Image: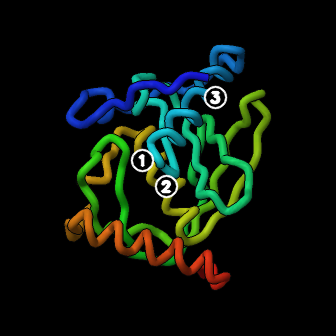
Amino acid sequence: MTVLEIVKYPAEILETKTKEVTKFDRNLHKLLDDMMETMIAADGVGIAAPQVGQSIRAAIVDIGEGDPPIELINPVITAVGGEDVDLEGCLSFPDLYGEVKRPFFVRVEAQERDGSLYELEAESFEARAIMHEIDHLDGILFNKKISRIVDASEFEELDEELVQLEKDGEGIE
């Protein structure tokens, strides 16, 4: 696996709607593996193909709660519900953090790396990460959705608090 270069804003590919994946072959598998490696190296929870220079509908989300990473190929949001405002960051905007309003719940239809269809439901942080990555596939960037910019130190403090809660066994609800 290879760590790829992450495309930074204002690169045009980040604001371009991606093309549907039609070939579920070794090249796609390698790209997904490299995207995962890149996301881990960058300490991210999600990455979309445009962020590594590929204009196709493929993304990965891994919020690190013991579940396997979610590979989203040709995802379509079929339902949303509720409302949630929380902090977000983005690998393509390394020094920008802000509050973004998104639905609390999402249902998505997507394909696996072998082309088989599946349906996924997610809530809270996982739903937020999935919708953030699907936005990337539609050329929509989170900087346009920020209601309040947050200082990086505030974002890091919250991250440290969440890590401590997990260590204390309190988890995140």
Q: In the rendering, which numbered label is found on residue 26?
A: none
**Disc number lying in front (3 or 2):** 3
Q: Please tell me which residue is depicted at 70% across the width and 20% down the height of the picture.
A: 24
Q: Name the mark on residue 33.
A: 3
Q: Residue at x 47, y 48 (%)?
A: 43
What secondary structure is marked by label 2? Answer: helix
Q: Of 84 and 8, which appears nearest the observer?
A: 8
SS for callout 1: helix
The image quarter containing residue 63 is bottom right
Q: Position of residue 41 (x, y in %)?
A: 49, 39
- How far apart, in angstroms, are the residues tagged by discs 3 and 2? 21 Å
Query: Is residue 25 shown left or right of residue 141?
Result: right
- Point out which mark residue 131 bears: 2
Give whichever of discs 3 and 2 has the lower sequence position. Answer: 3
- Mark 3 is surrounded, within 10 Å at the Cα level, by few (under 14), some (14 to 19) or many (20 or more) other residues, namely some
Q: Is residue 108 left or right of residue 8?
A: right
> Compared with residue 105, is residue 21 higher up or lower down, i.e. above or below?
above
- To which quarter of the image does residue 35 belong? top right
Disc 2 to disc 1: CB gap under 8 Å? yes
Q: Residues within 10 Å of mark 2 (few under 14, many from 20)?
A: many
Q: Amino acid at mark 1?
A: Asp
Residue 115 x/y as whole percent: 75, 29
Horizontal side of 85 relative to 166 (left or right) equals left
Query: How far separated are the C-alphas under marks 2 and 1?
Result: 6 Å
What residue is pinned by disc 1? 135
Residue sitting nearer the eye, 11 or 34: 34
Specify the quadrant that holds the N terminus.
top right
Q: What's the residue at 37%, 61% (across, down)?
A: 88
Distance (Cα) linking label 1 and label 3: 21 Å
The structure residue drawn at horizontal position 64% and vertical position 64%, both measured from the top left corner, is: 122
**Of pointers 1 and 3, the one earlier in the residue sequence:** 3
